[in-house]
């Protein structure tokens, strides 16, 4: 039975990534044979502001080096807005840089997944062109995320900002509220809904409930990160009850 080590680069105030990503992969273990262990390194960040996001991103190299010591099989950098706030296309150079940092430590290439890049790839994978977005950020940061998504070839049809700047408070948001927010955001004419454009905003308990109600794919930043992580490991990207993206080929 194969066991994979998943390294996670986590904002210091993030309390959701180490909950939802393992929960999804544990659910996968109920139906498929592979097993996973989880190993984290943290970057200091308390408030979701451009200044703190830039400072936090500068700590990612240290985190990649620390996780390389554990010889992880994949590195997942999960702070979507930290990458998207650095300018369009930044996920590509960031992933390449961190992979190189890890390789210097181990002598072998370590693949890097970012939640920002994973969400972009997942939206392409489901064939989306027009997307609606729910984000916890203040409006200027949500606009940066929308601009980034649009630079990757999509049209943002509608977006809701919850205006929460304290990252700990983002982690305390009730995922049940996303069911109502999914009714409020305009999805008429959209090809996909990004139910949570933030790995810190809890979404796993709500994603399948919303997916069952909508005919379009319902994605989250955390779910996209898991999807891309599994693909990167050469595994079937299947997780029960986590939305259309992770439902398997027959449900896409």
Image: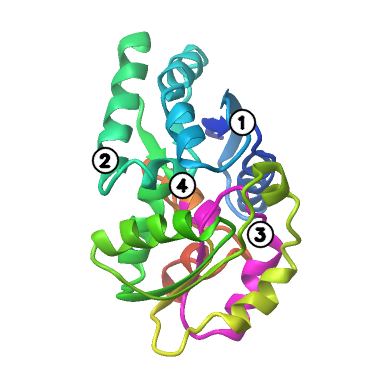
Instruction: Compare residues 246 and 138 and report the one nearer the observer.
Output: 138
Instruction: Pick whichever of labels 4 and 1 is earlier in the sequence.
Output: 1
Residue 99, percent across and down? 32, 26
For the residue labelled by badge 4, is the local secondary structure a helix, a strand or a loop? helix
Residue 233, percent across and down? 41, 39
Residue 91, percent across and down? 32, 42
Front position among marks 2 and 3 = 2
Residue 68, percent across and down? 45, 16
Tell me the residue at 63%/34% (across/down): 46
Q: Which residue is mark 1?
A: 37
How many angstroms separate mark 2 from mark 3 (CA)? 26 Å
Please indicate, yes or no, whether residue 189 appears anywhere in the rendered image.
yes
Tell me the residue at 50%/84% (across/down): 186
- Tell me if label 4 and label 1 are in contact, CB under 8 Å: no
Instruction: Pick whichever of labels 2 and 1 is earlier in the sequence.
Output: 1
Magenta span contains residue 213: yes
Query: Splitting the image into 4 quarters, where does residue 14 fall?
Result: top right
Instruction: Pick whichever of labels 3 and 1 is earlier in the sequence.
Output: 1
Q: Which mark is residue 204?
A: 3
Look at the image and give the residue range highlighted in magenta.
197-224
- Tell me if label 2 and label 4 are in contact, CB under 8 Å: no
How many angstroms separate mark 3 from mark 4 (CA)? 17 Å
How many angstroms separate mark 3 from mark 1 (CA)? 19 Å
Q: Is residue 38 left or right of residue 216?
A: right
Instruction: Pick whichever of labels 2 and 3 is earlier in the sequence.
Output: 2
Q: Which residue is mark 2?
A: 92
Q: Which residue is mark 4?
A: 80
């Amino acid at each position: 039975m194969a066991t994979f080590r998943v390294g996670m680069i986590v904002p210091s105030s993030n309390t959701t990534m180490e909950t939802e990503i393992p929960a999804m992969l544990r659910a996968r273990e109920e139906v498929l044979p592979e097993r996973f262990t989880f190993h984290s390194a943290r970057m200091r960040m308390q408030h979701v502001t451009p200044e703190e996001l830039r400072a936090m991103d500068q700590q990612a190299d240290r985190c990649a080096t620390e996780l390389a010591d554990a010889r992880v099989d994949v590195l997942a950098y999960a702070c979507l807005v930290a990458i998207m706030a650095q300018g369009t296309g930044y996920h590509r150079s960031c992933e390449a840089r961190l992979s190189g940092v890890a390789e210097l430590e181990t002598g072998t290439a370590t693949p890097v997944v970012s939640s920002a890049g994973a969400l972009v790839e997942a939206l392409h994978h489901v064939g989306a062109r027009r997307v609606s977005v729910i984000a916890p950020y203040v409006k200027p940061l949500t606009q940066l995320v929308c601009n980034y998504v649009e630079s990757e070839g999509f049209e943002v049809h509608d977006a809701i900002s919850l205006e929460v700047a304290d990252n700990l408070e983002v982690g305390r948001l009730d995922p049940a509220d996303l069911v109502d927010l999914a009714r409020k955001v305009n999805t008429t004419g959209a090809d996909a809904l990004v139910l949570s454009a933030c790995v810190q905003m809890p979404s796993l308990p709500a994603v399948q409930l919303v997916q069952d109600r909508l005919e379009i794919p319902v994605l989250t930043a955390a779910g996209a990160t898991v999807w891309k992580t599994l693909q990167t490991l050469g595994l079937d990207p299947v997780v029960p009850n986590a939305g259309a993206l992770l439902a398997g080929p027959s449900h896409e």
